[in-house]
């Protein structure tokens, strides 16, 4: 019975269903939706950073590509929002594929710089392409999603869609990292040469995981556009990419549940702490440095490890009986 | 961030027009040889700065195989420190030396406090640490200097010089001249002094260098100080032309890296060539195509180079 209650998936589902009972304010639902969207982004980035040992410093660009593809196509009213979401995935996935081919053959630094550069280019395009993107002042009038005729036009209604996506993607990611691919990724993380000698096609694997994390980001972007009904380039700048990296680092590298914690912590704190807002940039920098110097596996990861080990112990105690 | 339109400096201190030269969309004919020359001048000026930053990247890369993402912030710190020193005591030579000295200390501190204590030395950890350092320095600069742009007077007046059909500021010559001088001094240091030779030995083979008694960890620290100093010099040289702002570093750092990759990471000749080439390419593209996408040119070149010739034009150790 305790084993059943401690199952993280049940806890997650119960949490998602119980929160609406306690929360009534629509503002908190918006915040929860943003946490969910950030979680999707962070899980995707964590697959790349924590498991494959590669880094993207331009993840906001894929987030932006998804958001703007959805935004531009649906604000003009030419395309069904769900189709626009799929097109966003195609755009982001192809972009990641095209950048990934040249840079993933090289060592980590190149991917970091190339993604940083890509992030800058996309940001410039969003600002400069007034005709389509609305320029620096943003894109207005993005319609809400609807599901089978039922409009998801309030934060409360959208909450269930966002968190269903979060749950599915968390489950998919957890399964992925426990599969053959996950083991290959960890081998790649520890030693690329050793992984190659075990017949892991490392370049292709890195590319696949990079594209996958871009797809997560794009989906998050489309949801974001339909959540706020308004997007502006400033949400997709380099600083946002660095915030995402900080969320991964706080949640813990190679930790699926840590991604949720990292995203939630760093989304909620600035909302309630004024000093955090004021010194946001300094704080993010300090977190990145201090955590990576002393706990290279991430802040919450240590605690998660401990909890998982205890959980496994109780599991081991009950199965023989 | 780049292109952030929320922060608009008053008209009087907007960036001066000759860095974004000329009207757009010129066709190349004999008649507008003038604008072309103009683009070349401003391109070489910016390129010299990129070259200094690229050399900084190369020095640290050779000593440690780390890419220091905080390199651009050293440029920003150099410019802003020199400006503040100049406001305290109006002497440009003192401001220059003082700015470079302060930033050198910052570079040494970064190595000492953030990179040496790191327990894990995989690339991803080191990337995140230096990115964190960059963001931290930038945030501190924003708290200390605010978001406004500061001016530094040109080193020798602002009477334009005429070079055929093109005009240039004396500061352009200062940038090119001091840039060349710094590169020559650096080369002499690496070729002629014992410390320079020791650093080259470390870059070539760290273990062998240690075996013959070279203190490798001191050389690593030294490389951080030296590259911070180079970045600071670049920042102070360019400050009279572009103004000093807390967020100028990210972009310059990225372009310096592009220059380093273009020439071949770790090669000094490559860094200089890469920087000048990138500066001119960028200036021509912004003049002839569109100035709005000026900053995108560098990254386009970066991606193309990574695709076709990742070892760079001259062939470094990347």
Image (cartoon, rainbow, N blue to C red):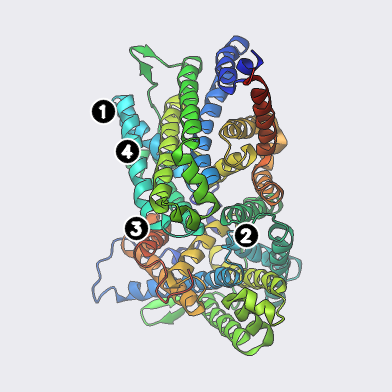
**In the image as oriented, which residue stretches furthest toward the front?**
A320
Chain under numbered label 1:
A
Circle 1 or circle 4, nearest the eye: 4
State the CA–CA distance, disc 1 to disc 3.
30 Å
State the CA–CA distance, disc 2 to disc 4.
44 Å
Residue B294, compared with residue B28, is above or below; it is: above
Q: Which mark is residue A78?
A: 1
N-term mark: 1 or 4: 1
Circle 2 or circle 3, nearest the eye: 3
State the CA–CA distance, disc 4 to disc 3.
28 Å
Q: Which residue is mark 3?
A: B290
For residue A242, side relative to residue A273 (left or right): left
Q: Which residue is mark 4?
A: A90
State the CA–CA distance, disc 1 to disc 4.
17 Å
Q: Which residue is mark 2?
A: B150
Q: Residue at x 50, y 35 (%)?
A: A178
């Amino acid at each position: 019975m305790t084993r059943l209650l401690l199952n993280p998936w049940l806890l997650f589902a119960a949490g998602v269903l119980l929160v609406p009972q306690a929360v009534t304010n629509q503002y908190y639902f918006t915040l929860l939706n943003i946490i969910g969207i950030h979680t999707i982004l962070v899980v995707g980035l964590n697959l790349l950073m924590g498991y494959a040992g590669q880094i993207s410093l331009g993840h906001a660009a894929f987030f932006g590509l998804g958001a703007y593809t959805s935004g531009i196509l649906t604000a003009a009213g030419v395309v069904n929002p769900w189709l626009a979401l799929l097109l966003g995935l195609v755009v982001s996935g192809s972009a990641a594929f095209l950048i990934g081919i040249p840079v993933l053959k090289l060592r980590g630094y190149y991917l970091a710089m190339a993604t940083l550069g890509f992030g800058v280019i996309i940001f410039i395009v969003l600002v400069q392409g007034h005709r389509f993107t609305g320029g620096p002042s943003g894109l207005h009038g993005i319609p809400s999603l609807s599901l089978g005729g039922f409009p998801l036009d309030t934060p409360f209604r959208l909450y269930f869609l966002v968190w269903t996506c979060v749950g599915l993607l968390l489950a998919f990611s957890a399964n992925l990292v426990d599969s053959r691919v996950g083991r290959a990724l960890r081998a790649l993380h520890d030693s690329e040469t050793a992984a190659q000698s075990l017949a892991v096609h490392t370049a292709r694997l890195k590319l696949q995981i990079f594209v996958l994390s871009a797809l997560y980001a794009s989906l998050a972007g489309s949801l974001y556009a339909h959540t706020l009904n308004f997007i502006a380039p400033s949400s997709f700048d380099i600083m946002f990419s660095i915030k995402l990296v900080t969320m991964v680092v706080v949640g813990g590298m190679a930790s699926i549940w840590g991604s949720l914690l990292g995203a939630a912590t760093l989304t909620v704190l600035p909302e309630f702490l004024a000093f955090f807002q004021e010194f946001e940039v300094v704080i993010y920098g300090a977190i990145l440095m201090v955590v990576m110097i002393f706990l290279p596996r991430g802040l919450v990861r240590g605690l998660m490890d401990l909890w998982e080990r205890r959980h496994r112990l109780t599991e081991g105690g009950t199965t023989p009986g | 961030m780049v292109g952030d339109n929320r922060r608009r400096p008053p008209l009087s201190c907007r960036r001066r027009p000759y860095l974004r030269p000329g009207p757009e969309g010129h066709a190349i004919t004999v008649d507008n040889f003038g604008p072309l020359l103009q683009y070349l001048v401003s391109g070489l000026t910016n390129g010299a700065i990129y070259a200094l930053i690229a050399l900084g990247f190369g020095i640290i890369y050779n000593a440690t195989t780390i890419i220091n993402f905080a390199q651009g912030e050293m440029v920003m710190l150099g410019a802003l420190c020199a400006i503040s020193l100049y406001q305290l005591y109006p002497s440009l030579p003192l401001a220059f030396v003082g700015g470079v000295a302060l930033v050198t200390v910052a570079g040494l501190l970064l190595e000492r406090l953030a990179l040496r204590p790191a327990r894990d030395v995989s690339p991803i950890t080191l990337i995140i640490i230096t990115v964190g350092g960059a963001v931290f320095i930038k945030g501190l600069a924003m708290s200390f200097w605010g978001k406004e742009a500061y001016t530094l007077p040109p080193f020798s007046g602002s009477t334009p010089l005429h070079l055929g059909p093109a005009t240039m500021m004396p500061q352009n010559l200062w940038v090119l001249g001091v840039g060349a001088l710094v590169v020559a001094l650096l080369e002499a240091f690496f070729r002629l002094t014992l410390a320079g030779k020791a650093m080259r030995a470390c870059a070539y083979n760290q273990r062998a260098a240690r075996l013959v008694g070279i203190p490798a960890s001191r050389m690593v620290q030294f490389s951080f100080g030296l590259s911070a100093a180079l970045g600071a010099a670049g920042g102070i040289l360019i400050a009279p032309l572009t103004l000093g702002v807390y967020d100028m570093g990210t972009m310059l750092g990225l372009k310096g890296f592009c220059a380093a990759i273009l020439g071949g990471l770790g090669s000094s000749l490559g860094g200089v060539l890469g920087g000048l080439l990138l500066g001119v390419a960028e200036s021509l593209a912004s003049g002839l195509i569109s100035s709005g996408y000026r900053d995108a040119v560098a990254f386009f070149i970066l991606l193309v180079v990574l695709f076709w010739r990742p070892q760079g034009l001259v062939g470094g150790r990347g």
